[in-house]
Image (tube, helix red, strand yellow):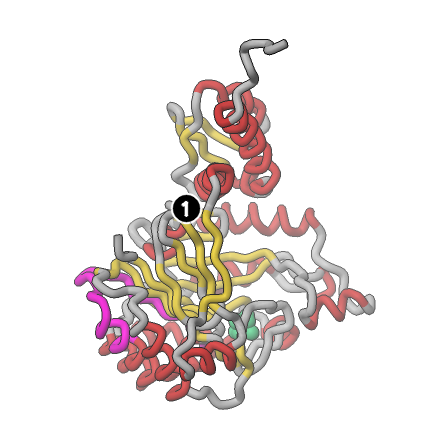
Amino acid sequence: MPPRHLYIHVPFCARRCSYCDFSIAVRSSTPVEEYTSALRAELASGVIRGSTLDTVYLGGGTPSRLGGLGVADVLTSVRDHASIAADGEITIEANPDDVNDVAVAQWVTAGVNRVSLGSQSFDDSVLEWMHRTHDAPQISRAVKALRRGGISNISLDLIFALPDTLKRSWERDLTLALDLEPAHVSLYGLTVEAHTPIARWRDRGAIVEGSEDTYEQEFLLAHELMVNAGFVHYEVSNFARPGRASHHNSAYWTGAPYAGVGPSAHSFDGASRRWNVSAYSKWVRCLADGQSVLAGAETLTEENREAEEVYLGLRTRNGLQIDATEVDTTARWIDAGWAELDGSQLRLTPLGWLRLDSLAADLVARRTRKLDEVLSPTPSHCYI
Ligand code: SF4
């Protein structure tokens, strides 16, 4: 079946944020024509031929660095090879400092109907520490420009669990985000990844990572404030007003097939996963030379599928269907307030989401053992 979801990786950023280990290309000026030409060549290879796309997601990096016309060019190339459903969701990730009336008008004309704004904090000193390219007032200016241009489906990203020394008020940031009345909010706990500026700061003792207690308190405070404000906590990191959940990300969480184009983009056809070369310059060169940009592929085993089903199910509010043999296993989760059982549907609570990895690993281990027993049953006869 042709994929119904398309991810387009746009790798450009003006500078690297202090916490970021994504596959990006730091450029002071964005090579829009070079990128859109290479993308046209990749799309012409047939990855979305015959598709009717329900969602298109331009992620990065910073897709808004393509400007209004660059984004329009990308979407024209997509339409050259596939249809986009009349009610299709077309999202771009944007930095607040790239949002202005001209760009918004061009995005809307091109079909963009959802914008995910990289806000991260409303505290200027924190934004500076993060090496963000915008300040706090630019966030509300961007939201106003998006609304003026006709985009109401606006998501804000915020980061929590920052080092205590920054003295960031998480409650103030959440309140200021809610004051902007977004349709959707994504919250990410700060993790210190290798080879990032903050990893170097930590290694030389200049910062101490936020504690587990801070992480837990801020996650639970966010859940409380957001739910009280009318949002549905529909996935471990995501909150939406009713009817405003991200269709694109929800497709990932249900295991739907998707195509990915651009450097480092991943694709999934329902059985196997493929991924592109990650370096931007190599991706451009391969396409210019008519070579494949495929860097690797893996076919999911039964065990992989079980693990994915458990992780994806438990991270969403929809939850995971369990069978009678798993009810005993999960009873203690319910006693501890980590999960709820609705018929045979098991859902993690916010307290459970704080333990998502270990709870999912526990269930995966049990399912894998059961699978092994089915695939390699213990001999019932003794051959002497
Ligand atoms: S804007 Fe996003 S992708 Fe770019 S450096 Fe910052 S966090 Fe990374």
**Quarter of the rendering containing residue 204:** bottom right
> Camera-side residue: 366 or 145?
366
Q: Residue at x 64, y 51 (%)?
A: 215
Name the image quarter holding the C terminus: top right
**Quarter of the rendering containing residue 80:** bottom left
**Quarter of the rendering containing residue 191:** bottom right
Reply yes or no: does residue 85 show up in magenta: yes
Bounds of the magenta segment: 75-96
Residue at which label 1 appears: 234
> Camera-side residue: 328 or 347?
328
Q: Is residue 231 above or below residue 343?
A: below
Figure quadrant, ligand 1: bottom right
Q: Residue at x 22, y 67 (%)?
A: 82
> Camera-side residue: 88 or 210?
88
Query: Outermost residue, left direction?
Result: 86
List x then y, in percent, for residue 153. Answer: 32, 63
Q: Is residue 244 left or right of residue 159?
A: left
Q: Please indicate, yes or no, whether residue 2 appears anywhere in the rendered image.
A: yes
Q: Is mark 1 within 8 Å of ligand 1?
A: no
Q: Is residue 264 above or below residue 249?
A: below
